[in-house]
Amino acid sequence: MLRKGGQNLLTRMRVVESACASGPSSTLGGGIQNAVSSMDGSEGSRGVSTLAVKQRMRSVGNIQKITSAMKMVAASKMRNAQAATEQCRGMQEPFFEDAGDLPNASGEKNVTVPVTTDKGLCGAINTMICKYTRASMQVANPEEEQMIVILGEKGKSQLQRDQKTKIVATVADTQKTALTFPQACSIAEEILKTEYDVARIVFNRFVSAISQKPTIATVLSPDSLEKEAEAGGSLDKYEIEGPGRAELLQNLAEFHLATSLYTAMLENNCSEQSSRMSAMENSTKNAGEMLGKLTLTYNRTRQASITTELIEIISGATALEG
């Protein structure tokens, strides 16, 4: 049952409808028809506006769910990668004690091995590796031959823009399965084919879940190791005798390259997962903030539409009473 005010409003609207039906040229009927047509147009525009905001809210919400799931996956992978990295670091320390770290070593043939990722959405770790690689190319002696062996698709896509002539090999899809030492040895064999004098492996060293440090590991060839020992380097304190001295240095250099490469790939993998976890966390937070702003915009638009409709109804009722 309608209240008294509602019944009076309904009666007046029926009177207006009869007036419109009796004469379309009537001033009152034409005014009401114009008002109705304008109301329909405004409601259509408001409907389109709220629909677009609602679709945007739905898409941002889906992105937030995806980034949140990627963050949890990256955190799980990071824990496993961190355990493998900490176990592998013990293989690298004896070489630093015996051969030392020689960042200023130089030779006629120099090869740089940037270790990058195959996938994106992991922050700026690949950009930093490419930046360090370009810097090492710029400070090198122009008379020395410079070569690049790239690990990872992201490094290839960046370095081939300005270092294309120096790239001799590219290795990709190294993280599809769990990294093993034989896999690193097979990559090291490809690097040995360049017949380098000095090899520099550029990678991200894992420090913490929110910190990764770009690092360069230097590996010398057997001839460079012999020259370093004769010059009074770190190996000079060991007595290397017998006919197998050259073979011993050859094996030491190859094993040093394989262990350095294996450690660098594990470190970079752990850094990749930690950087991706941080990036996805920030993306989830940004999506939440954007979703809040869109929700506020949607509610304001909806409330404005309701308020406008109420004002139009009241104005029409007031006009009928007058």
Image (tube, rainbow, N blue to C red):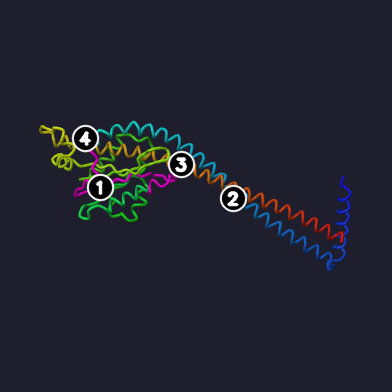
Earlier residue among tags 3 and 1: 1
From the viewer's side, name the closer residue of 313 and 212. Answer: 212
> How far is disc 3 from disc 4 in space, using C-alphas?
37 Å
Query: Which residue type carries mark 4?
Result: Asp
Q: Which mark is residue 278?
A: 3
The answer to whether any part of residue 313 appears in the image is: yes
> How far is disc 2 from disc 4 in space, using C-alphas?
60 Å
**Mark 1 residue element:** strand
For the magenta stretch, what is the residue range? 99-127
Earlier residue among tags 1 and 2: 2
Q: Residue at x 26, y 40 (%)?
A: 188
Residue at label 1? 111
Residue at label 4? 98
Q: Residue at x 63, y 51 (%)?
A: 297
> How far is disc 1 from disc 2 in space, using C-alphas?
49 Å
Figure check: 230 above or below 316: above
The residue mark sitting in front, 3 or 1, is: 3
Q: Is residue 109 magenta?
A: yes
From the viewer's side, name the closer residue of 302 and 45. Answer: 302
Earlier residue among tags 3 and 4: 4
The residue mark sitting in front, 2 or 4, is: 4
Earlier residue among tags 1 and 4: 4
